[in-house]
């Protein structure tokens, strides 16, 4: 019975040590873990990276990984708390749609990794008389979300391979004050980030041009 307090003490000390900054040779392993977390977030939240820019996204990903380390050894689905975590950041009010874009990306990843199931055989229902008594389960990859911003349109517009042709004629989604953002792209394919990184020289004219309109 005396071994249990010692085991508990060891587990508590071990958990506390993991959360502390690593020094010496151990820092190599800690940096490797952080790098893996950042790579996993970059793979799972590609549109968020495009919106923030690669440099800022990496800084955000490192901060998230330090506060929310992985709970499983497999990083393919890492980052389930990322959309909610984004809403708690001080700069979030500048990009109110970002967490919902991240939520869409999370649902997309979950759908990709959902278990395969055999589609329903609709021919088996041809002789059913009472359709109200039928209960059909949703596909394991089905996901739903309630969005209060045009996050889905933003997500589609940033996809590497658009689904169909995009209509660039803007249509307001709901009434109220809306934000129009104009983004420039140079010959090398570099785009302006939503939040420009600070630089000591003082150049600040690298942000997206913002206009506000009132939709009634």
Image (spheres, rainbow, N blue to C red):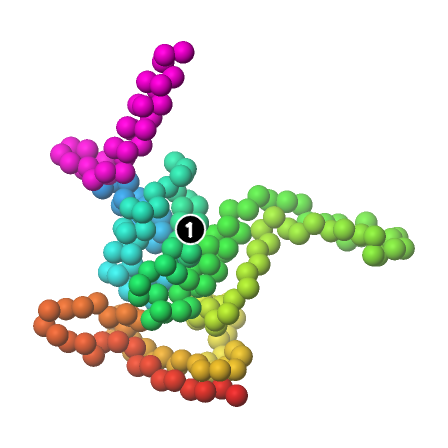
Q: Considering the image in quadrants, where does the N terminus appear?
A: top left
Residue in the picture at 83% in, 52% down:
133
State the image coordinates of residue 35 (x, y, percent, origin top left).
Answer: 27, 45
Relative horizontal placement of residue 2, taking residue 56 as reference (left or right): right
Q: How many marks?
A: 1
Relative horizontal placement of residue 28, taking residue 66 as reference (left or right): left
The quadrant in which residue 2 appears is top left
Residue in the picture at 37% in, 41% down:
70
Residue 22 is one of the magenta-drawn residues:
yes
State the image coordinates of residue 11 (x, y, percent, origin top left).
Answer: 33, 26
The quadrant in which residue 18 appears is top left
Residue 41, placed above or below residue 160: above
Q: Main secondary structure of the magenta part?
A: helix
Residue 148 is one of the magenta-drawn residues:
no
State the image coordinates of residue 164 (x, y, percent, origin top left).
Answer: 52, 71
Q: Which residues are magenta?
A: 1-30
The residue most toward the top is 1
Residue in the picture at 24% in, 60% down:
55
For mark 1, give the secondary structure. Answer: loop
Q: Mark 1 sits on what residue?
A: 81
């Amino acid at each position: 019975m005396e071994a249990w307090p010692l085991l508990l003490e060891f587990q508590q000390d071990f958990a506390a040590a993991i959360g502390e900054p690593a020094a010496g040779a151990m820092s190599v392993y800690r940096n490797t873990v952080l790098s893996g977390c950042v790579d996993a977030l970059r793979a799972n939240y590609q549109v968020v990276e495009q919106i923030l820019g690669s440099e800022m996204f990496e800084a955000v990903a490192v901060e998230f990984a330090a506060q929310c380390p992985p709970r499983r050894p497999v990083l393919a689905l890492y980052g389930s708390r990322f959309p909610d975590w984004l809403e708690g950041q001080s700069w979030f009010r500048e990009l109110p749609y970002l967490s919902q874009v991240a939520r869409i990306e999370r649902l997309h990843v979950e759908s990709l990794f959902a278990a395969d199931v055999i589609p329903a055989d609709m021919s088996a229902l041809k002789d059913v008389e009472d359709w109200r008594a039928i209960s059909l389960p949703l596909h394991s990859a089905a996901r739903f979300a309630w969005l209060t911003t045009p996050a889905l349109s933003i997500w589609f517009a940033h996809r590497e391979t658009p689904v169909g042709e995009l209509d660039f004629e803007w249509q307001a989604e709901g009434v109220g004050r809306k934000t129009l953002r104009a983004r420039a792209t140079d010959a090398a394919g570099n785009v302006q980030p939503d939040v420009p990184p600070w630089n000591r020289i003082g150049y600040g004219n690298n942000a997206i041009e913002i206009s506000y309109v009132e939709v009634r």
